[in-house]
Amino acid sequence: MTTPPSSRVASFGQTEINWDKLDKKRFYVVGAGLFTGVTVALYPVSVVKTRLQVASKEIAERSAFSVIKGILKNDGVPGLYRGFGTVITGAVPARIIFLTALETTKISAFKLVAPFELNEPTQAAIANGIAGMTASLFSQAVFVPIDVVSQKLMVQGYSGHATYTGGIDVATKIIKSYGLRGLYRGFGLSVMTYSPSSAAWWASYGSSQRVIWKFLGYGGDSEVTTAPSQSKIVLVQAIGGIIAGATASSITTPLDTIKTRLQVMGHQENRPSAKQVVKDLIAQDGWKGFYRGLGPRFFSMSAWGTSMILTYEYLKRLCAIED
C-alpha cells in the first residue's frame, strides 16, 4: 500500500515546501539577491568551461588549470568574470520564469502520475523531470540571447575570436549582421541541451532524495516518527544535488560542446553548421572531442546544482507562509 502524500510530507519534516505555501513577492525579491551571490561565486567555472570547448587544436591551453593560468596572466581576476554583467542582467528574469514554471508544473505532474501508483522515487523522477524540462523550455526565450552574448564575451580575443567593448556592443553587432535571429544562434541546440539536462537534473535530484530518505528510515513501512533535523535535511539535499549534477553533465556534455562552439563562431564570415562543428570535433580529437570541458562542466553542474538547490531550499524556508 502506497503511503498517502500528506503522510509522506509530514514524515520528512516538511522537507518540501509547495508553491501554494510561499510568499511569492518575498520569494522573488530575496531569491534575486541569493542567486546573484551564487552566480558571483561560480561564474569563473563557466568561463573556463567555455574556453576549453571552443579552443582550436593549435591552442596550448588544453586543461582547466592552463586556461585559468592564461586568463590570470593576461587579464587578472577580472578576466574570470568576462560577460558577467550581461549574464546577471538576464539571469533574474530567466530565473523568475524558470522557478515559477518549475513549481507550478511540478504540482500538476505529481497529480498526473499519482493514478499509476508507482513507487515514490519513480513518481518523483517523472514529476520532477517533466517540471524541469518544461521550466527550461519557458526560460530559453530569455536565456539564449544572454548565453550567446555572454559566451562571445567569455572568449573574446581568445583563439582568434573578436573583441568587444561590452554586452551591448556584442548584441548590436550581432543584430546588425544577422538580425534578431542572430541572438538566437543555437536556440534549437540550447533547447536540446538544457531541456534534457534540466529534466535529468531535477529527476535525479527528486528521486535520489527519496531513496536516501528511505535508506535513513523515513518513508515506507519503516517510517520513523521523529522529523529529521535541519542539518540532516541540508545534507540529503546537498548529496542529491551532487548526484543530479553528475547525471546531467554525463548525459548532455556532447550537445553542450556543439552548442557552445556554434554560438561563439559567429565572428567568421562562413559560419559553421552544427554538422560541420561535429565533423571538426571528430577531426581534431575524435569522439572524445565531444567531451571537451567535461571536468569543468561536471564540476560546474555539481557545484552550481548543489549551491543552487541549497540556496533554493533555504529560500523556500525563508519565504514559507506559516499556518
Image (spheres, rainbow, N blue to C red):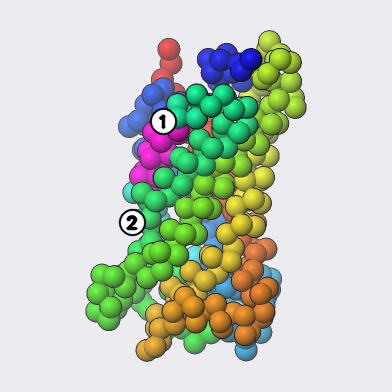
Q: Earlier in the sequence, mark 1 or mark 2?
A: 1
Neighbor class of circle 2 (other Cα within 10 Å; few <14, some 14-19, many 20+) is some
Residue 239 lies left or right of residue 267; in this view the side is right
Residues tagged 1 and 2 counted as in contact (Cβ below 8 A): no
Residue 205 or residue 109, whichever sits in front: 109
Which quarter of the rendered picture does the C terminus lie within?
top left
Q: Which residue is mark 1?
A: 108
Q: What kind of element bears circle 2?
A: helix
User: Which quarter of the picture shows residue 263?
Assistant: bottom left
Alpha carbons under labels 1 and 2: distance apart:
23 Å
Rendering quarter of residue 50: bottom right
Q: Residues within 10 Å of mark 1 (few under 14, many from 20)?
A: few
Identify the element where label 1 is drawn: helix
Image: magenta residue range:
94-109
Query: For the residue marked with disc 1, what is the amino acid?
Result: Ser
Report which residue position mark 2 lands on: 141
Quarter in which the N terminus is drawn? top right
Q: Name the residue at the top extreme.
A: 225
Q: Is residue 89 above or below residue 32?
A: below
Residue 65: quarter of image:
bottom right
Please say whether residue 101 is one of the residues in the magenta stretch. yes
Amino acid type at circle 2 is Ala
Task: Where is residue 313? Give x, y as percent.
Answer: 53, 33
Query: Can you say whether 136 is above or below 227 in the image?
Result: below
Residue at image position (74%, 15%) is: 222
